[in-house]
Amino acid sequence: MRRVLGLLAAALLVAAIVGPAAAAATPVTASGLAADIDGPGSGVDRSATTPAIAADPPTQVRPANATTQVRPANTTTQIRPVDPAQTAETCNATSNDAIGYWEGVCHDSELDVDPSDGLSDEELTRLVHRGMARVEYVRNRSFNRTVPVETMTREEYTTMISGNDSASGNDSASGNGSATGNRSEFNRWNDQVWKALFIVGEDGSSEEAIQGTLSGSVAGFYSPAQDRIVIVVPEGETLRISEATLVHELTHAMQDQYHNLSRPRYVGATQDSDLAIDGIVEGEAAYVENRYRERCETGEWECLPAPNDGGGGSSSGPANWGVYLTVFQPYSDGPAYVAEIVEEEGWSGVDERMEHPPNATAETIHREPRRPANITFTDTARNGWTTYPDQGVNGSDTAGEASMFTMFWYQNRQYGADTFDWRATLTDTSHPESVYNYDHPSTAGWAGDRLFPYRNDEGATDRNGYVWVTEWRTALDAAQFHATYRQVLAAHDAVHREDGTRYVADGGFSGAYAIERNGTRVTIVHAPDSDAVFDLRPAIDPVQPIDGGATVTPLSPTIPDDGTPTAEPATSEEETDPTAEETPGFGIAAALAALAALTATALLARRRRG
């Protein structure tokens, strides 16, 4: 799940999430999801073995049209002093050992390149060399070798992430599969993870949702397995690339040269750990990219204008906003996480985190050490219900704070759930380097979770379910999550039954739910009916505690006159059409897109490895 970068997708995402124009877009239903988090986008393709995310050798991918957010003027993060490289006037070194110089090109060299009619091979080579010099200058260290840059059509990229090609350089471009090589088993297991997050329903496919979300969003990626950068371009068109995307991917190449991104440490065992690892990997690349943008804006560096075609990405937004926002979290919180490390510890602190990556998104969200709780689990299911011992971590996955925040965000946006205002909450960031906000009281107290998908193949119809054990820092945090989660069920017209379960009659999230809150622990059990719930977890006590705990007053969605919750407010005259030509092609949205593509690929790969 390394990063993918593209103008259009990013811009669309930002507009859709931040501005009312996006709200005007047709809502995406859970059933329309399709995706595989193992494919490259704009970032690093390093899929490996992470249960809900992806599992293959790392390859950084950045979503197309998803540029990293450029911080407002006067709010830039302080840049620690570095040893400046030689200037263009004196940069006549013959050795690439000089920081800020590569193959005769300096970081501040002006290139005689006209990108309007496409780049020739010679022009691309010079642009790559200048990009390498600029990454060196910002990062204050040298590359060890030249990084090859190649191109791939969007059709070829889509085929690759669909699992029909090995162009990414991964041995399992189609996904690693489970420990037993059963891809269908992995997909069935993973479907329950995304259903538990209320992002992909029973009537959808998590694999298709992930692939569909990423396929049109990737502008380029770096493959550690093949030590190359691949730029995704439209079929039959001249080569135009974003220099910012190139800088981002070159940063991943430098990471690989110093840290070897193919190592197992860069593939999380769970969805949450995978996203957390991406937080440092993508965070550093986005941070360097932001420094590049600052120098372009101030005129310190001559920079090529961004292409207007968005890298061929989709102009209609991601197939599933929930999947997209989940995989984008490292691209959003990662730069802020890295910025604080650089300010407090210098680049040595970043190198230390690269050697010992964070293992929970709570750490990158709050920018402080967070050690997940050790949750023990005993399987007590009966009457034919079994786990998937060959998938994830002994059959379980960890959703983590970022994914759980997205659950509540997506349910408000898509179904009008009375959780919190999706637009206002998302843009209320606590750091100028952050694109979106993933911090909310409903999930900020996360201390750990384990999600166990179950199956029952006895009888005429195969049945699915899950047991989700969540741990919180305080009893109040647990009560807050509990109350907000019940709002999600209410949005799907859940009926509270005498046995304590809540039943959703139809839709992609139909079935029975039992929620038990005991101190700092909240356990959720889901199955097709109430009897199956108690077969999955015989001792579950879904009676709501009477201690009160927390009084939660979620923000209410807009309710039209007909009484139907509206997740997306209508567009006002002042709002801008996200598809308009004036929409920035390479900004926050682009960063989001890139992140999504990369992350998704890694997520799927890891999960398949089991």
Image: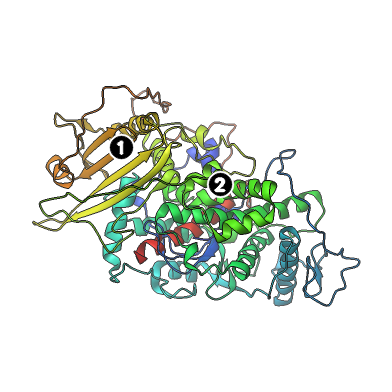
* Res. 259 in view: yes
Q: Nearer the viewer, residue 435 or 50?
A: 50
Farthest residue, direction right: 89
Q: Is 89 drawn above or below residue 552 in the view shown?
A: below
Horizontal and vertical percent position of residue 235: 55, 70
Taking the image as shown, residue 299 lies to the left or right of residue 286, namely right
Say which mark, if any, is on residue 393. Answer: none
Q: Which residue is identified by label 1?
A: 522
Q: Amino acid at mark 1?
A: Val
Q: Which residue is identified by label 2?
A: 333
Q: Is 534 drawn above or below residue 130 in the view shown?
A: above
Q: Nearer the viewer, residue 302 or 525?
A: 525
* Res. 31 in view: no
Horizontal and vertical percent position of residue 363: 51, 46
Q: Amino acid at mark 2?
A: Asp
Is label 2 in a helix, a strand or a loop?
Answer: helix
Q: Nearer the viewer, residue 562 or 351?
A: 351
Taking the image as shown, residue 398 lies to the left or right of residue 359, namely left
At x 36% / y 37%, what residue is drawn? 415
At x 8% / y 56%, what residue is drawn? 459
Taking the image as shown, residue 445 lies to the left or right of residue 563, namely right
